[in-house]
Image (spheres, rainbow, N blue to C red):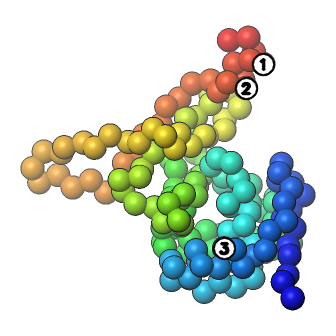
Amino acid sequence: MDAYLCCCQQISIHFFMKTEDYTPILESAGIRPTSTRLLIYEAIAHNSDTFSLSTLEKQLDSIDKSVIFRTLVLFHEHHLIHSVDDGSGSHKYCICHNHGHCHEEEAHCHFYCEICQNTYCLNEDLIPHIDLPEGFIARKVNYIVKGICAKCAAKHSV
């Protein structure tokens, strides 16, 4: 019999999904798909944009905070999620949409709203390739556009 899990009520989109649907993604990344990891990945997959540890803690209040943190670290190390430095001081993450794996050539831009402080993935806008001078080694590229999101612009008549 298939087990169905309902993700937390705080998520704006309520859904029912078989947790087995995410098993191949975790396995292909070399991660053992425990029930807790599947629940955490399910919550991540249903965040429409970036998310923080505190966002997941609120959504998954029945899971210990340290377990959520360690799972985020594991998912990051196995390239299922990537970190986003939007300059807000809050560490945020974004899911990798290419069958669960982030690749350098798929790095996309992000938009940080200076009013609501939400960070949005601009998946269609890839970070341009930069030719570095000889001897330079890029370790991470971060491309953030800062401004006012459409929702805040409409609310504040900007």
In the rendered view, tell whether residue 97 sits above or below residue 122. below
Q: Which quadrant does the C terminus fall into?
A: top right
- Amino acid at circle 2: Lys
Closer-to-camera residue (128/138): 128
Quadrant of residue 155 in the image? Answer: top right
- Amino acid at circle 3: Tyr
In the rendered view, tell whether residue 102 sits above or below residue 128. below
Under circle 2, the secondary element is helix
Badge 2: how crowded within 10 Å, few (<14), some, or many (20+)? Answer: few
User: Do the residues bearing badges 1 and 3 touch, measured as CB atoms within 8 Å?
Assistant: no
Q: Residue at x 83, y 48 (%)?
A: 12
Badge 1: how crowded within 10 Å, few (<14), some, or many (20+)? Answer: few
Counting from the top left corner in percent of width and height, residue 87 is at 52, 40
| Residue 68 appears in the rendering | no
Q: Residue at x 41, y 42 (%)?
A: 126
Report the residue that reaches farthest toward the top: 157
Residue position for label 2: 151
Residue position for label 1: 155
Give how far apart the Cα atoms at labels 1 and 2 are: 6 Å
Q: Nearer the viewer, mark 1 or mark 3?
A: 3
| Residue 123 appears in the rendering | yes
Q: Which quadrant does the N terminus fall into?
A: bottom right
User: Do the residues bearing badges 3 and 2 touch, measured as CB atoms within 8 Å?
Assistant: no
Per the rendering, the mark at residue 22 is 3
